[in-house]
Image (cartoon, rainbow, N blue to C red):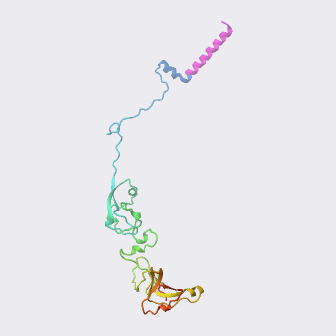
Amino acid sequence: MRLRTFILLILVLLLAAVLVFFLVARGGGIFSGLLGGGGDNGAVPTPAVDVSEPSGAEPGLPAPTPTPTFETVVVARLPIPVGQRLTEEMLVVEQRPTTNVALQGGYIFTDVADVVGKIARVQIARGQEILTPMLALDPTDVAQFGSDLALFVPFGEVAVAFPIDSESGAAFAMRPGDKVDLIMTMQVVNIDPVFRSDLPNKTRRVLETQLLLGGPFLFPPVEEGRLEFIPEINQVAAIIPGGSGLGATDLYAGDTDFTVPDSD
């Protein structure tokens, strides 16, 4: 054998020995498994998983859903407007689940008697729970836009406004809820159905030529008669009773008749 071949063989053996040593040092368990050894191979044990069914449950079936619980709640039997004083006929008691947010917050009523007599602060829909923030004890606490005067007027009646000053209004010291004596008079007059003004109307003639020239154009007023459209001539005519003093001789070319409501 030549020297060169011998040296190469020795180098191959050394490399093989180093490789075997490295494999044994880094993963000796591999050889143990290949050789069937019963020693510890370094594997981490996996904990056992309990796959047993819950107590009382059928194998392969989901767990039963808990039965919901209900609580007695006062709700609106019909729509309730803002400012309405609640009566027993407007309310009803129903069962609502305890998962309701209003029930969890403790804003509900369980007895109709606790709600009767209070005033609706907001509009309440039919079937809606009656909550404490929705009610007011005094009409001045009602949250609404505009005046709350209607809350003080009994149903079926109307309120009439009249001017007051510091003397008649007790120095403006009156407040909602005060009781006062009112003395007032009312004048009843006939109303014109067209102009909605007090009768009688004043009928006056206008001289159109003087109106255009800027001179006096109004004739004396006449309290009798009315203006009426005549379809046959397609014009408005003044219908005046006989003997009123406004004869045909007073009508000139260019004259125009019209009615001035309640003019003096």
Tell me how many marks there are: 0
Q: Is residue 263 above or below residue 136?
A: below
Q: Position of residue 90 (x, y in %)?
A: 33, 65
Please identify the residue farthest to the front as the structure is shown: 232
Between 146 and 219, the one lying in front of the other is: 219
- Observer-nearest residue: 209 or 7? 209
Q: Position of residue 69 (x, y in %)?
A: 33, 52
Q: Can residue 21 be seen here?
A: yes
Residue 90 or residue 222, whichever sits in front: 222
Residue displayed at 50% across by 91% down? 250
In this rendering, the answer to whether 165 lies above or below 128 is below
Kindly indicate the quadrant of the structure image that contains residue 150.
bottom left
Which residue is rendered at x = 51% and y = 20% of the image?
31
Q: Is residue 171 visible?
A: no
Magenta residues, start to end: 1-24
Q: Quadrant of residue 143?
A: bottom left
Q: Main secondary structure of the magenta part?
A: helix
Query: How far from the left and from the top, in percent, is residue 178?
Result: 40, 79
